[in-house]
Amino acid sequence: MTATFDSSNCDTPFWLPGSHLQTLYGATLARYHAIKFVRDRIETSDGDFIDIDWAGPGLFPHKSADNTQLRADAELANTAARRWAQPQDWLNLPTDPQTQAVVLFHGLEGSSASHYAQAITQYFRARGWVVAVPHLRGCSGFTNRMARAYHSGDTEDLSFMLKSVVARLPSARWHAIGVSLGGNTLLRYLGTTSASEIPLVAAAGVSTPLDLVACGNQLSDSFAGRQLYGRYFLATMKRKVLEKAKRFPGLIDVLRFSHIKTLREFDDIYTAPMHGFRNALDYWTRASSLPVLKDIAIPTLVLNARNDPFVPDASLPGPLDCSGAVLLHQPADGGHVGFVSGGFPGHLNWLPGRLARYFETYQ
């Protein structure tokens, strides 16, 4: 069987034309309800940690389960979490086997404070779902302990994060959403893991760079990729790696690294060698999820706007490239994780509504 194909459009407003406007406006100016989380820290087997932000019935960022008002934790001030989880919090999660839950894997340099994470969490939480947002290493507002960080093909870390959230609420019906880089990792995990070992009812990848070679070239070689998007990502990525270089002398050639200007150069000098790849091309080739879409066995939505400035239209898959468990939705507009809709000033409800409809109907 081949994938089902949906070309219906996002209700993009007429006053927001073009891929760059749709992307940038969605990330900076479109409206959503800001929320706070309860944070859990999980230790990894290699001596590092993963921070997971939680929202949903029974979890209250401003008070404990017994209704005692709690002060915000000062060390979380620059994050979307308000306090650390307490043992009693987990006892107050719903235990009904029909409880709906979703884990959201964020994108490159994202977090639970990202516009899409906030909009999706608010939408599902308001409908009684439990939401968990694990942070990739170094993205939670805290420096991770290791010389390594994260990469787009790290299905081992994703599997660990998924098992950790499911263990907190084992009776729930778990779903997963991966956005951008997180979408690639999630789809690669789904396509390389036996269905019997995947603790999910359904999944979705949003604005996913399925072909990392095509997308990496787009972000490294195009004018907007180099001067706009690449600069934005590299501003935090370079700072984090240079901080690691102080803790791990000899980790990288600091002089050479300080002069990089593209994501290809960043992945050549740091991401690839630090995570077991020869260079950026080897990393992009081996970590791409496109080749394994045909092996996905659980219901999965793959949503990509055809005008995504990060993802060349020609790199998007067709039905023959995917298994029958996949629904490809490729609207003409939406930009990269933009999907703004409504009258001015616009809002971000279309994306979470689309995800909820898929999880409820698989359509």
Image (cartoon, rainbow, N blue to C red):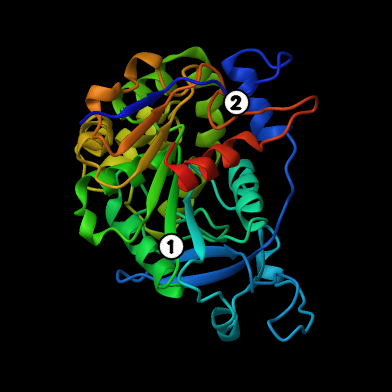
Q: Nearer the viewer, residue 148 or 17?
A: 17
Where residue 125 appears, as percent x and y from the top left, is: 63, 57
Residue type, mark 2 in image = Thr
Quadrant in which residue 342 is drawn: top right
Residue type, mark 1 in image = Arg
Q: Residues within 10 Å of mark 1 (few under 14, many from 20)?
A: many
Q: Residues within 10 Å of mark 2 (few under 14, many from 20)?
A: many
Horizontal side of 67 relative to 172 (left or right) equals right
Mark 1 secondary-structure assignment? strand
Q: Is residue 113 visible?
A: no
Residue matched to label 2: 23
Q: Relative to 313, is 345 above or below?
A: below
**Disc with the residue nearer the chain's start (2 vs 1):** 2
Quadrant in which residue 2 is drawn: top left
Mark 2 secondary-structure assignment? helix
Q: Relative to 281, is 171 above or below?
A: below
Where residue 339 appears, as percent x and y from the top left, is: 60, 29
Q: Nearer the viewer, residue 261 or 191?
A: 191
Q: Relative to 102, is 33 above or below?
A: above
Where residue 235 appears, as percent x and y from the top left, is: 55, 37
Q: Nearer the viewer, residue 345 or 141?
A: 345
Q: Residue 173 has which mark?
A: 1
Where residue 152 appears, as percent x and y from the top left, is: 35, 42
Horizontal side of 98 relative to 123 (left or right) equals left
Q: Quadrant of the N terminus?
A: top left
